[in-house]
Image (cartoon, rainbow, N blue to C red):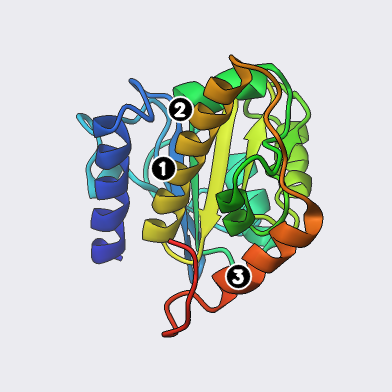
Amino acid sequence: MSDLATELLGIVARLEEMGLNHGSSGNVSCRLPEGMLITPTGGNSANMTPERLVRMSPDGDILGPGIPSSEWHMHLAILNAYPEVRAVVHTHADHCVALSCLRRALPPFHYMVAGFGGSDIRCAPYATFGTRALAEGAVAALQDRKACLLANHGMIAVGKSLQQAFDLTVKLETLAKQYLLALQSGEPVLLPEEEMARVRERYASYGRGLLAPE
Protein backbone atom coordinates (compact mmCIF):
# COMPACT_ATOMS: atom_id res chain seq x y z
CA MET A 1 0.00 0.00 0.00
CA SER A 2 2.98 2.34 0.49
CA ASP A 3 3.36 3.07 -3.24
CA LEU A 4 -0.36 3.80 -3.53
CA ALA A 5 -0.25 6.08 -0.49
CA THR A 6 2.71 7.95 -1.94
CA GLU A 7 0.90 8.39 -5.26
CA LEU A 8 -2.24 9.63 -3.50
CA LEU A 9 -0.24 12.19 -1.52
CA GLY A 10 1.42 13.31 -4.74
CA ILE A 11 -2.00 13.95 -6.29
CA VAL A 12 -3.03 16.02 -3.26
CA ALA A 13 0.12 18.14 -3.60
CA ARG A 14 -0.38 18.67 -7.34
CA LEU A 15 -4.00 19.75 -6.82
CA GLU A 16 -2.82 22.39 -4.37
CA GLU A 17 0.08 23.50 -6.56
CA MET A 18 -2.33 24.09 -9.45
CA GLY A 19 -4.75 26.02 -7.26
CA LEU A 20 -7.49 23.43 -7.64
CA ASN A 21 -7.77 23.02 -3.87
CA HIS A 22 -7.11 25.49 -1.09
CA GLY A 23 -6.24 24.70 2.52
CA SER A 24 -8.03 21.58 3.68
CA SER A 25 -10.80 21.74 1.06
CA GLY A 26 -11.30 18.76 -1.23
CA ASN A 27 -10.33 15.13 -0.75
CA VAL A 28 -8.94 12.15 -2.64
CA SER A 29 -9.53 8.42 -2.35
CA CYS A 30 -8.59 5.20 -4.11
CA ARG A 31 -9.79 1.62 -4.03
CA LEU A 32 -8.08 -1.02 -1.90
CA PRO A 33 -8.75 -4.78 -1.90
CA GLU A 34 -10.36 -4.35 1.52
CA GLY A 35 -12.19 -1.08 0.79
CA MET A 36 -10.68 2.35 0.24
CA LEU A 37 -7.85 4.66 1.23
CA ILE A 38 -8.90 8.30 1.79
CA THR A 39 -7.38 11.55 2.94
CA PRO A 40 -8.07 12.48 6.58
CA THR A 41 -10.27 15.28 7.83
CA GLY A 42 -8.44 18.60 7.79
CA GLY A 43 -5.70 17.15 5.62
CA ASN A 44 -3.49 19.03 3.18
CA SER A 45 -0.11 18.47 1.59
CA ALA A 46 1.69 20.19 4.46
CA ASN A 47 0.36 17.96 7.22
CA MET A 48 -0.33 14.63 5.53
CA THR A 49 1.88 11.57 5.64
CA PRO A 50 1.17 8.01 4.48
CA GLU A 51 0.46 7.11 8.11
CA ARG A 52 -2.33 9.71 8.32
CA LEU A 53 -4.27 8.30 5.36
CA VAL A 54 -7.35 6.39 6.51
CA ARG A 55 -8.35 2.90 5.43
CA MET A 56 -12.07 2.08 5.39
CA SER A 57 -14.12 -1.02 4.66
CA PRO A 58 -16.86 -1.10 1.99
CA ASP A 59 -19.36 -0.83 4.86
CA GLY A 60 -17.80 2.37 6.21
CA ASP A 61 -15.82 0.88 9.10
CA ILE A 62 -12.52 2.63 9.86
CA LEU A 63 -9.71 0.10 9.47
CA GLY A 64 -6.74 2.41 9.82
CA PRO A 65 -5.61 5.34 11.93
CA GLY A 66 -7.21 8.74 12.10
CA ILE A 67 -10.53 10.26 11.10
CA PRO A 68 -11.50 10.19 7.41
CA SER A 69 -12.55 13.21 5.38
CA SER A 70 -16.06 14.42 6.12
CA GLU A 71 -16.91 13.44 2.53
CA TRP A 72 -16.10 9.77 3.06
CA HIS A 73 -19.77 8.82 2.49
CA MET A 74 -19.55 10.23 -1.04
CA HIS A 75 -16.27 8.54 -1.92
CA LEU A 76 -17.36 5.17 -0.56
CA ALA A 77 -20.77 5.34 -2.24
CA ILE A 78 -19.13 6.03 -5.61
CA LEU A 79 -16.62 3.19 -5.26
CA ASN A 80 -19.37 0.79 -4.14
CA ALA A 81 -21.69 1.81 -6.98
CA TYR A 82 -19.13 1.70 -9.79
CA PRO A 83 -16.71 -1.27 -9.59
CA GLU A 84 -14.69 0.05 -12.56
CA VAL A 85 -13.76 3.20 -10.64
CA ARG A 86 -10.42 2.99 -8.86
CA ALA A 87 -9.97 6.59 -7.71
CA VAL A 88 -12.09 9.62 -6.79
CA VAL A 89 -10.97 13.26 -6.71
CA HIS A 90 -13.16 15.95 -5.16
CA THR A 91 -12.10 19.60 -5.35
CA HIS A 92 -13.41 23.11 -4.82
CA ALA A 93 -11.75 24.34 -8.01
CA ASP A 94 -12.82 27.95 -8.63
CA HIS A 95 -14.52 27.70 -12.02
CA CYS A 96 -16.25 24.43 -11.18
CA VAL A 97 -17.56 25.99 -7.97
CA ALA A 98 -18.75 29.07 -9.86
CA LEU A 99 -20.61 26.96 -12.41
CA SER A 100 -22.05 24.72 -9.68
CA CYS A 101 -23.46 27.82 -7.96
CA LEU A 102 -25.45 28.49 -11.13
CA ARG A 103 -26.71 24.89 -10.82
CA ARG A 104 -26.08 24.35 -14.51
CA ALA A 105 -24.79 21.23 -16.19
CA LEU A 106 -21.82 21.73 -18.46
CA PRO A 107 -23.46 21.40 -21.90
CA PRO A 108 -21.88 20.28 -25.22
CA PHE A 109 -20.35 23.68 -25.95
CA HIS A 110 -17.01 21.99 -26.74
CA TYR A 111 -16.29 18.56 -28.17
CA MET A 112 -14.06 17.64 -25.21
CA VAL A 113 -17.14 17.37 -23.01
CA ALA A 114 -17.65 14.02 -24.78
CA GLY A 115 -14.47 12.74 -23.13
CA PHE A 116 -16.41 12.49 -19.87
CA GLY A 117 -18.77 9.85 -21.24
CA GLY A 118 -21.76 11.75 -22.59
CA SER A 119 -23.04 14.96 -24.11
CA ASP A 120 -22.97 16.90 -20.86
CA ILE A 121 -21.47 16.93 -17.39
CA ARG A 122 -24.31 16.88 -14.90
CA CYS A 123 -24.75 19.01 -11.79
CA ALA A 124 -25.95 17.02 -8.78
CA PRO A 125 -28.64 18.63 -6.58
CA TYR A 126 -27.50 20.53 -3.52
CA ALA A 127 -27.15 18.63 -0.25
CA THR A 128 -25.29 19.41 2.96
CA PHE A 129 -21.63 18.40 2.84
CA GLY A 130 -20.70 15.10 4.40
CA THR A 131 -24.21 13.65 4.17
CA ARG A 132 -25.58 10.50 2.58
CA ALA A 133 -27.93 12.71 0.54
CA LEU A 134 -24.91 14.33 -1.11
CA ALA A 135 -23.40 10.88 -1.74
CA GLU A 136 -26.62 9.64 -3.38
CA GLY A 137 -26.83 12.71 -5.60
CA ALA A 138 -23.23 12.30 -6.71
CA VAL A 139 -23.70 8.62 -7.55
CA ALA A 140 -26.74 9.45 -9.70
CA ALA A 141 -24.98 12.32 -11.49
CA LEU A 142 -22.02 10.07 -12.30
CA GLN A 143 -24.06 7.39 -14.07
CA ASP A 144 -22.32 6.83 -17.44
CA ARG A 145 -20.05 9.79 -16.68
CA LYS A 146 -16.51 10.33 -15.44
CA ALA A 147 -17.22 13.59 -13.59
CA CYS A 148 -19.97 15.77 -12.22
CA LEU A 149 -20.53 19.08 -10.50
CA LEU A 150 -22.02 19.37 -7.01
CA ALA A 151 -24.46 22.27 -6.70
CA ASN A 152 -23.08 25.18 -4.63
CA HIS A 153 -20.10 23.03 -3.68
CA GLY A 154 -17.55 21.78 -6.20
CA MET A 155 -16.78 18.87 -8.48
CA ILE A 156 -15.93 15.16 -8.60
CA ALA A 157 -13.87 13.24 -11.13
CA VAL A 158 -13.42 9.47 -11.16
CA GLY A 159 -10.96 7.25 -12.97
CA LYS A 160 -9.41 3.85 -13.38
CA SER A 161 -6.34 5.27 -11.68
CA LEU A 162 -5.39 8.22 -9.51
CA GLN A 163 -3.62 9.78 -12.49
CA GLN A 164 -6.69 9.52 -14.70
CA ALA A 165 -8.93 11.04 -12.04
CA PHE A 166 -6.43 13.88 -11.63
CA ASP A 167 -6.21 14.48 -15.39
CA LEU A 168 -10.00 14.62 -15.67
CA THR A 169 -10.11 17.08 -12.77
CA VAL A 170 -7.76 19.43 -14.60
CA LYS A 171 -9.71 19.04 -17.85
CA LEU A 172 -13.06 19.71 -16.16
CA GLU A 173 -11.80 22.87 -14.47
CA THR A 174 -10.46 24.08 -17.83
CA LEU A 175 -13.79 23.42 -19.56
CA ALA A 176 -15.73 25.14 -16.78
CA LYS A 177 -13.49 28.20 -17.12
CA GLN A 178 -13.94 28.27 -20.90
CA TYR A 179 -17.70 27.91 -20.63
CA LEU A 180 -17.99 30.73 -18.13
CA LEU A 181 -15.84 32.93 -20.38
CA ALA A 182 -18.09 32.16 -23.34
CA LEU A 183 -21.19 33.03 -21.28
CA GLN A 184 -19.83 36.54 -20.77
CA SER A 185 -20.46 37.26 -24.45
CA GLY A 186 -23.76 35.43 -24.79
CA GLU A 187 -25.14 31.91 -24.91
CA PRO A 188 -22.61 29.51 -26.49
CA VAL A 189 -23.63 27.53 -29.58
CA LEU A 190 -23.98 23.89 -28.58
CA LEU A 191 -22.86 20.92 -30.63
CA PRO A 192 -25.67 18.55 -31.74
CA GLU A 193 -26.04 15.09 -30.25
CA GLU A 194 -24.95 13.36 -33.45
CA GLU A 195 -21.64 15.24 -33.43
CA MET A 196 -21.04 14.41 -29.77
CA ALA A 197 -21.72 10.74 -30.58
CA ARG A 198 -19.10 10.88 -33.35
CA VAL A 199 -16.60 12.43 -30.97
CA ARG A 200 -17.24 9.73 -28.35
CA GLU A 201 -16.52 7.09 -30.98
CA ARG A 202 -13.23 8.76 -31.84
CA TYR A 203 -12.28 9.01 -28.19
CA ALA A 204 -12.87 5.25 -27.90
CA SER A 205 -9.99 4.65 -30.34
CA TYR A 206 -7.64 7.18 -28.77
CA GLY A 207 -4.21 5.73 -28.11
CA ARG A 208 -4.74 2.77 -30.43
CA GLY A 209 -2.96 4.22 -33.45
CA LEU A 210 -6.14 5.60 -35.01
CA LEU A 211 -7.04 9.22 -35.65
CA ALA A 212 -8.63 10.67 -32.51
CA PRO A 213 -9.07 14.11 -30.94
CA GLU A 214 -6.29 15.60 -28.87
Q: Which residue is mark 3?
A: 84
Discs 3/1, front: 1
Tell me how far mark 3 sits from mark 1, CA to CA: 21 Å
What is the secondary structure assignment of the residue under circle 3?
A: loop
Q: Earlier in the sequence, mark 3 or mark 1?
A: 3
Circle 2: residue type? Ala
Q: Is residue 87 above or below residue 13?
A: below
77 to the left or right of 181: right
- Residue occupied by mark 2: 93
Q: Residue at x 63, y 64 (%)?
A: 199
* 35 horizontally vs 140: left or right: left
Name the amino acid, label 3. Glu
Residue at x-position 22% and y-position 30%? 47
Of the two numbered discs 2 and 3 on the same chain, state the one appearing first in sequence. 3
What type is the residue that disc 1 sits on? Val
Sequence-first disc among 1 and 2: 2
Q: Which residue is mark 1?
A: 170
* Residue 88: % across, % down: 51, 50
Q: Position of residue 129 (x, y in %)?
A: 63, 24
- Nearer to the camera, 193 or 69: 193
- Report how far apart the C-alphas of labels 1 and 2 lie in the structure: 9 Å
Above/below status of 169 relative to 126: below
Q: Residues within 10 Å of mark 3 (few under 14, many from 20)?
A: few
Residue at x-position 54% and y-position 54%: 158
